[in-house]
Image: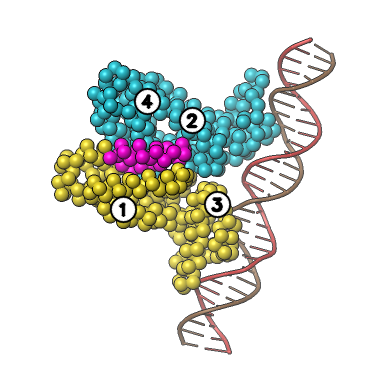
Chain colours: A yellow, B cyan, C red, D brown
Amino acid sequence: MSQLQPLTTKGQSTRARIVQAAAELVAEKSAAAMSLDDVGARASASRSQLYHYFDDRDDLIRAVVRATTDSVLLAQDELLDHLDTWAGIDRWFRALVAFQEERQARGGCPIGSLVGQLAERDPLARLGLADGFERWEGRLREGLERMQERGRLSVTADPGSLATATMALLQGGLLLTQVRRDPSQLRTALDAARVLLRSAAA
Amino acid sequence: MSQLQPLTTKGQSTRARIVQAAAELVAEKSAAAMSLDDVGARASASRSQLYHYFDDRDDLIRAVVRATTDSVLLAQDELLDHLDTWAGIDRWFRALVAFQEERQARGGCPIGSLVGQLAERDPLARLGLADGFERWEGRLREGLERMQERGRLSVTADPGSLATATMALLQGGLLLTQVRRDPSQLRTALDAARVLLRSAAA
DNA sequence: GCATCACTGGACTGCACAGTCCATTCCCGC
DNA sequence: GCGGGAATGGACTGTGCAGTCCAGTGATGC
């Protein structure tokens, strides 16, 4: 459990600065390579401040997981609102590929990358990541359900399975993109997702 | 480059023991959590032996990458030989799901998990992982090409893209399986791969 | 003005770890 | 059997790091 909620606005901003700095370092290097000294330096916070707001290192990492998933979802929030039309889905896919091209295929998925680092090490962090995926996949599932209600998707189609398969293609595509330093890997994966979803069209 | 090839058979077995122990520790914990002391203890090798066969820690990790990819491919070697029939592909998929059920959805993909840990940190390790994926995906691509030659796959289908999309579904499915501790996530992903591949049937 | 509590500074401790060094033993060819 | 390189043992060094401790400061209510 995260130590305590800061009571004053000043405390809140200090805590936020620490989490932000930690999240940046985790994204740039890795969770294991993030040191509390680095975090303190970047956030202009002393050692005491870190331990004032977090129980220990693991507690801070969990806050990073939450901040990272929130940030990934927020960044594509509008796109996720329109996954109930084919055009909206295509727009989402194109944005994801464009983002990878921009980043030159570096870094992979900020959430997915953490799975291999934390899932087997910290059960609470794993749950936080699972929650992030659930919120993400849920948005697609809801979009597909609305399409089904409007008769755009076959009545026999299963929006849940389609959403899961699409998330798998997205995550797998990002992994291959990262390891091969080639954004077209994600494009290929999402083209396949398009085929899969269209094959369930009404 | 890996320091030197051991010249005597005794040296070869010592080196192999070290790599094996290191690979186990990396799989059980993570690459960052593997310490040279642990490796030495498990392999019954002294510090000097580690540095006799490897330049440094990173060099050993690279050997672990190679050993891990080799081992993953070897374990499913026979299955990969028969990816030129629908029955062979289904058999492969079923074996992958069965394996995850056996392991209770723990650990994810030994290769995929390393991507998030090493890809942005050690370019050589990233290349080793990319090579592993290439050898893996290549086996599927070759199977699909043989199917195309025999008229089982549409002439307009692209075995390369299909193989990439299938690998993405496999890796993404394993990631979701690991983070949700639920082997049926992989089943759903591979069912989607089946739909995708069949949609390219002749 | 003073009491209280959130908040901050920074030195200190202890340890785990990567990497070094030098000495010794083993094995092979000759 | 002996010379030399391969292989091994294990102590040693330095450092980076998580976590602790105690002493402060600042704001807020009364």
How crowded pointer 1 is (Cα within 10 Å; few <14, some 14-19, many 20+) is rated as some
CA separation in Å, label 2 and label 3:
28 Å
CA separation in Å, label 1 and label 2:
35 Å
Say which amino acid is labelled 3. Met
Q: Is residue A165 visible?
A: no
User: What percent of the width, then of the height, locates residue C26?
Assistant: 72, 21
Please name the residue that numbered disc 3 is placed on: A34
User: What percent of the width, then of the height, locates residue D17?
Assistant: 60, 52
Which chain letter goes with mark 1?
Answer: A
Vertical side of B69 occupied by A50: above or below: below
* Foreground residue among B183 and B89: B89
**Secondary-structure class at tag 2:** helix
Which chain letter goes with mark 4?
Answer: B
Which chain letter goes with mark 2?
Answer: B
Please name the residue that numbered disc 1 is placed on: A79
**Which residue occupies 28% across, 35% down?**
B192
- State the predominant SS element of the stretch in magenta: helix
CA separation in Å, label 4 and label 2:
15 Å
Vertical side of C1 occupied by B41: above or below: above
**Which residue occupies 32% across, 28% down?**
B158
**Which region shows up in magenta?**
A166-194
**Secondary-structure class at tag 3:** loop
Mark nearest the camera among 1 and 2 is 1
**Which residue occupies 61% across, 23% down?**
B13
Please name the residue that numbered disc 2 is placed on: B131
Label disc, if present, on residue B141 of the rendered structure: 4
Earlier-in-chain disc, 4 versus 2: 2
* Foreground residue among B95 and A71: A71
